[in-house]
Image (cartoon, rainbow, N blue to C red):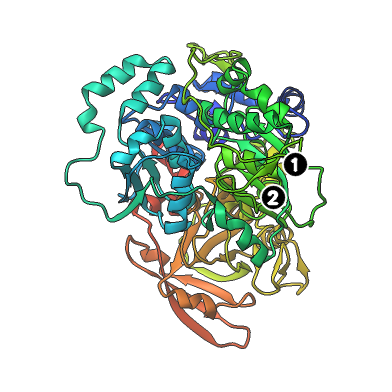
Amino acid sequence: MAMLQFISSGLPRVAVPSTIHCDHLIEAQVGGEKDLRRAKDINQEVYNFLATAGAKYGVGFWKPGSGIIHQIILENYAYPGVLLIGTDSHTPNGGGLGGICIGVGGADAVDVMAGIPWELKCPKVIGVKLTGSLSGWTSPKDVILKVAGILTVKGGTGAIVEYHGPGVDSISCTGMATICNMGAEIGATTSVFPYNHRMKKYLSKTGRADIANLADEFKDHLVPDPGCHYDQLIEINLNELKPHINGPFTPDLAHPVAEVGMVAEKEGWPLDIRVGLIGSCTNSSYEDMGRSAAVAKQALAHGLKCKSQFTITPGSEQIRATIERDGYAQILRDVGGIVLANACGPCIGQWDRKDIKKGEKNTIVTSYNRNFTGRNDANPETHAFVTSPEIVTALAIAGTLKFNPETDFLTSKDGKKFKLEAPDADELPKAEFDPGQDTYQHPPKDSSGQRVDVSPTSQRLQLLEPFDKWDGKDLEDLQILIKVKGKCTTDHISAAGPWLKFRGHLDNISNNLLIGAINIENGKANSVRNAVTQEFGPVPDTARYYKKQGIKWVVIGDENYGEGSSREHAALEPRHLGGRVIITKSFARIHETNLKKQGLLPLTFADPADYNKIHPVDKLTIQGLKDFAPGKPLKCIIKHPNGTQETILLNHTFNETQIEWFRAGSALNRMKELQQ
C-alpha cells in the first residue's frame, strides 16, 4: 500500500534510500520450502508488482523468503545513532543496535521517500535502569514482559523508552533488539539501548566492522548524558527477575512462569498446550535458536519429544542458513519441530491451522510479540501466551502450562525423573554467518524503461483514487456505524491472516472493516444495526449501504483505540467506506496519525465519561471546523432519537500541517496541491 500511495504522488523516484520487504504473504502450512513455493505461485502478481515498482522508483526489493523486515534491518541497515522509519510497528527492533527506529504508516513513509521532513510530536522519555545480570532461564524477553506488566499496553504511548544501567552489558545485541521490538506492545514510540561492546561485536560479525569503529569514535554521544532526567523511571534487578509468560489475549497480562499454571486453573484457561511456536521477528536470533536447541537436546538425550506441536520460524534467510549449517535446525526437527518459511507466518495470522476447529477452546504458547484475540489463527477461543523461545520449547516438551522448568521434573523414556538444565548458547556463530541464498534485488541506475502494470480487473491490486476534499462545512447528523466496547486493536479494525492477500486492493480489503470489534449494543462482533432498515448486519455491509445512500458516519471507541500493528488499512478502510470521524477516549500513536493522513478526524472526549452519553442510535454533529485550529476543541452535538440534545467537547492533537491534510482530503492530496 505504501508503494501504491507513492505511485499516486506522481514523483519519479524516491529521494532517500528505501527498501521493500514482502514478509506477510507466506502462509504456514507444511514447512518452509513447500510453503514458499506455494506463496510465490499464488502471490506472483503482487510480488511482480513490488519488484517492478521497486525497480521503477529506485527502491531495493527483498524477495519472498528473504525474511522478516526487522531481522533484515538489524543484519543490514541499523546502526548506532541512525534515524530510520519503517511501515511496521515493530521497527523499533533496531534499537538493539542503538538506532532510533520508529514504526509509521505508509503515508508517513511516502513523505520520507519523497524527501519531505518527517515530523513527530516530541516524546517523553521513560528510563528503564537495569542492574544485576541475566542468568539461568531468565532471558532478554523477560525484561520486556516485566516492563509490559508494569506499564500496560498504553503506558508507553507518546514516549521513547531508554534502557540503561550496568545490567545492559549482560544482554546480547539481539537480546536488546528483542526488548526494543516488543516495546510496541506498550505503545512506545520507540525503544533504544546505549552503544556498547555487544553491539560492536554484532556489527563486526555482520560485516560492518567499519561502522563499529566509527561508533567507537563517537561513543560518548551514543549513551545517556550524565545526570539526564527521565519523565518516568523504572528499575529492574536482573538478578531477581524470573522467567515470565504473558497472556492470554493481551501482551501486558504478566505472570511468572512458576505461577501461570495456578492462575490458569483458577481462570479456567486450558492447561494443555496444543502448539508451541518459536521464532518471528522478536525471537529468532542465532542465540534464541541455540538456547531452544539446548533445551531440545536435553529432552532428546532422555528419549523425549514434544508433547505439543512445535514450529520454528527463522527471522531471515541468513538465520535459516546458519542454523541449518550449525545443526540447530536439525535438533529442533528431531524433537518434533517443523521449520517454517522465513516470514511472519503464524505471528501475523498466516497459519493454515488444522488441529482444532474454529471456536474450540485451546492454549498455544509463542515467542512472538502479540497475542490479541484471534490474531494467530482467527480463532477467538485460542488462548495465546507469549514468552521466551526456550520457555516455549520446554513447555512444548512438557505439554502443559503447569510445568516450571526451574523446579519441575520430566520423566524420561526409561521412567527416570530428570530436570532440564538452564540453557546456554553462543550469542553469535563461531564461524561467519552463512548468508544463504541471494534474495536482494538492487534498483537499477536507469529505470526509464521500466513498466509497472496494475490490471483494472485485478482482485489483488488496485490503483488509489484521491479522497474527496472537505466541503468547508461542519459535519451534520453523522450516523454511528458502531460504538465499540473495550479493546479495539488494528487487528479488530482490519483483520490480518487471509485478508492480507488484499492489502494492495483497498476495496476488497475493506470487507474486513471492524469485523472483530465488539458492538456495545448487542455484545457481538460484526453485527451492527442499520439505522435506515433497522436490521442487524455485518459492519462492512452497513458501511457500504451508508456510503451508497450518501450517509456520513462516525465510530465511537474506547481506550487506546488502534493499538497494535501500524496497519494503515485500519485508517484507509473507514475513509474509503464513507467514515468521517473516529471519537475515542484515547488513541494509539501510529493509528491516530494514520487517520489524520487519510483525511479523517480522530477526536477524543474532553471528559472520558462522555463516552457513556452516546448511544448507537444517536446522531452526532461536529461543529467548529471552519475555525479548526491547533489546541482548540471542537463541539459535538449529540442528538437522541427522542428529540433531546446534549453538547460535549472533543479534543484533538492536529497541528497546522495536519489541519491542511484534513482540508485537502488527505495528506497525499495536500502533497499534490503543493506540487502544482
| Label 1 packing within 10 angstroms: few (<14), some (14-19), many (20+) | some
Helix, strand or loop status at disc 1: loop
| Quadrant of residue 524 within the rendered picture | bottom right
Question: How much space separates mark 1 and mark 2, taking CA atoms?
Answer: 9 Å
Q: Nearer the viewer, residue 450 or 104?
A: 104
Residue 576, which numbered label? none
Q: Count every numbered label the image shows and give the total.
A: 2
In the displayed structure, 189 sits above or below 528; it is: above
Q: Position of residue 132 (x, y in %)?
A: 33, 43
Which residue reaches farthest left?
227
Residue 400, which numbered label? 2
- The answer to whether residue 390 is left or right of residue 354 is left
Q: Nearer the viewer, residue 500 or 286?
A: 286
In the displayed structure, 56 sits above or below 532; it is: above
Could you tell me which residue is drawn at 59 percent across and 26 percent down? 67
Q: Position of residue 554 (x, y in %)?
A: 57, 65
Q: Position of residue 404 (x, y in %)?
A: 59, 49
Residue under numbered circle 1:
307
- Upstream in sequence: badge 1 or badge 2: 1
The quarter of the rendered structure image containing the N terminus is top right
- The answer to whether residue 369 is left or right of residue 48 is left
Helix, strand or loop status at disc 2: loop
Q: Amino acid at mark 1?
A: Lys
Q: Amino acid at mark 2?
A: Thr
Does the residue at mark 1 contact the one at mark 2 (Cβ under 8 Å)?
A: yes
The quarter of the rendered structure image containing the C terminus is top left
Q: Is residue 249 visible?
A: no
